[in-house]
Amino acid sequence: MAQYLLKNAAILTMDADFTLYEDGYLAVEGNSIQEIGPTAQLEESRFAGYTVLDCRGKIITPGMINTHSHLSMMVFRSLADDVPDRLKRYLFPLERTAMTREMAVAGANYAFAELLLGGVTTVYDAYYFEDDIAREAEKAGIRGVLSETVLCNPSPSAKEPYGGIPYTREFVKKWKGHPRITPAVNCHAIYTNDTAHLQECHRIARENSIIFCMHVAEMGYEQADCLRDHGMTPVAYLDSIGVLDNRFLAAHSINLEENDLDIYEKRGVKVSYNAGSNAKGAKGVAPIKKMRERGITVSLGTDGPMSGNTIDILTQLPLVGKVQKLFNHDRSLFPAKEIFEMATIGGAKALGLDGITGSLEVGKRADLVIFETDSVNMNPIYDYYSVIVYSANPSNVESVFVDGELVVENRRLLTIDLKEARSRMLAYRDEIAAIARELDKAVL
Ligand SMILES: [Zn+2]
């Protein structure tokens, strides 16, 4: 059984009181946090046989949580970044013509490397071939909430429309109860699913007490078509068909009216705020100030690598602060501490995992990050939260534990051969570039 003693570190616990130890220790036994406190109270003799890490000058935080991504899209990253209507013009055709099981696995495998090296210990993924992705996540040592995408069109993993539903049933049965992999249900959006299938997916989520995630109130046409077809906003429509509850995770949630916020609050809906993807897609600013004032859980996501490019959460943190301060014309809003809360315990709440991760507390799983502070961007430190939110980047992540296992040690991945993962993914580059050239021609 793994036993570690981390001492002499600044520890940001992100517990309900935001307890911060300027000079603290943390003991890991098996997959859990056994003890945490000020180093002055450490009785080191009680930890004989433990691997001791002297973390002087380092900062320990909970592992970060990315609550919205489509990891296998990694293989398409940097294509069509500036193309309008990228989803229908590029992404759907690329997936239709190119995406295979092997490609999805290669993309996800590389993505897991990037996530862990960036200090993300839990990720939510919605894509295709999720059974294979789950096996990769298992090997990578990351915590995953994973779901097969359901939509009305044939998909890379299903020839039949809505083939994601039988896939999801099998997937949930197979992975439920796994210590690190949690199955979930995903419908792509209201414009790619009809009412009956949305309700069927909600039933699967309810019967299994698992998360049901969708893209909600993200697109302009989604809003307009829903008003035309149903006479109400997407959120009001989803509520009218009975699929919103406290296990519903709404990604994006940009175009919300007051009544939509009322519904989120009443139903206990959780939100994944995708600051970078929303901004790059010129979609708008999600009203997360209003959400938080109503007590709605807001977490952070990156969206797929073709939308937000990077998938670590550290890169999102300054964006959250800057976009929201600018949007609300108020510098005092969203102090760094609150932004980091959304990145950690907020993410755990959104995924229904706050009982086991998201904060550093005795009994919770040891999912944590050790930041170095030797790099030029990390000094001076007056406010630890500010340093993490506005100064740190993934290269400052030194070591990472997931479920008590050391998965990144001194910036070296222990669970994935990065060189091998890269060449496996890049093997598809020429084929994808050729398809993209054809797509370019199609619109000229
Ligand atoms: Zn998405």
Image (cartoon, rainbow, N blue to C red):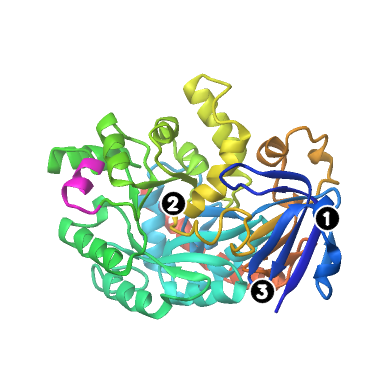
The picture places residue 234, in percent across and down from the top left corner, at 24, 43
**Magenta region includes residue 236:** yes
Q: Give the answer, above or below, for where 293 lies relative to 225.
A: above
The dot on residue 13 is none
The picture places residue 93, in percent across and down from the top left corner, at 37, 59
Element on which disc 1 rests:
loop
Amino acid beneath label 3: Gly
Between discs 2 and 3, the one toward the N terminus? 3
Magenta segment main secondary structure: helix
Quadrant of image for the N terminus: bottom right
The dot on residue 440 is 2
Residue drawn at x 55%, y 71% as measured from the top left: 137
Between discs 2 and 1, the one toward the N terminus? 1
- For the residues labelled 2 and 3, the Cα–Cα distance comes to 52 Å
**Magenta region includes residue 4:** no
Is residue 296 or residue 374 the one in the foreground?
Answer: 296
Q: From the image, state whether disc 1 or disc 3 is nearer to you.
A: 3
Residue that numbered label 1 is attached to = 55
Q: Which residues are magenta?
A: 235-243
Residue that numbered label 3 is attached to = 30
Q: From the image, state whether disc 2 or disc 1 is nearer to you.
A: 1
Within 10 Å of disc 3 (Cα), the crowding (few <14, some 14-19, many 20+) is some
Amino acid beneath label 2: Asp
Indicate if the residue with disc 2 has its beta carbon within 8 Å of ligand 1. Answer: no
Q: Give the answer, above or below, for where 436 lies relative to 264.
A: below
